[in-house]
Amino acid sequence: MYEVRKAGKVFRIYDREHKQYVANTENRDLANMFVSKLPFRGFEGEIPAFFLKDTKYGINLDRNGN
């Protein structure tokens, strides 16, 4: 259902079922871990719009909140 797509130095997590990017990172291992243990599984369907609001390629996993 989800796959990692590489674009330059960035790895983007793509939801094939809903045809949208849900996250991105410059860390290949983090992208692969995110896909294998995807926290979005609990949403049962499409990820809520508010979660991806104002993002072109989903949430940036490299941000640490600082």
Image (spheres, grey):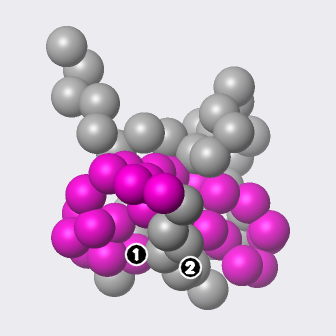
Question: What residue did someone put label 2 on?
Answer: 2
Q: Secondary structure at mark 1?
A: helix
Give the vertical position of 13 relative to 4 (above or below): above
Q: Quadrant of residue 56?
A: top right
Q: Which residue: 31% across, 76% down?
A: 32
Give the vertical position of 53 relative to 49 (above or below): above
Estimate how packed mark 2 is, as few (under 14), some (14 to 19) or many (20 or more) residues with alpha carbons within 10 Å: some
In which quadrant is the C terminus drawn? top left
Question: What residue did someone put label 1 on?
Answer: 35
For badge 1, the amino acid type reads Val
Give the vertical position of 38 relative to 65 (above or below): below
Estimate how packed mark 1 is, as few (under 14), some (14 to 19) or many (20 or more) residues with alpha carbons within 10 Å: some
For badge 2, the amino acid type reads Tyr
Q: Is residue 53 visible?
A: yes
Give x and y (percent) for residue 5: 54, 72
| Magenta stretch holds residue 45 | no
The residues colored magenta run 8-35
- State the separation of the CA atoms marked 1 and 2: 6 Å
Give x and y (percent) for residue 35: 40, 75
Q: Which residue: 60% across, 38% down?
A: 51
Q: Locate residue 64 relative to residue 1 in the image: left or right.
A: left
Q: Which residue: 39% across, 54% down?
A: 9
Q: Locate residue 46 relative to residue 5 in the image: left or right.
A: right
Give x and y (percent) for residue 26: 32, 51
**Which circle's residue, 1 or 2, is located before the other in the chain?**
2
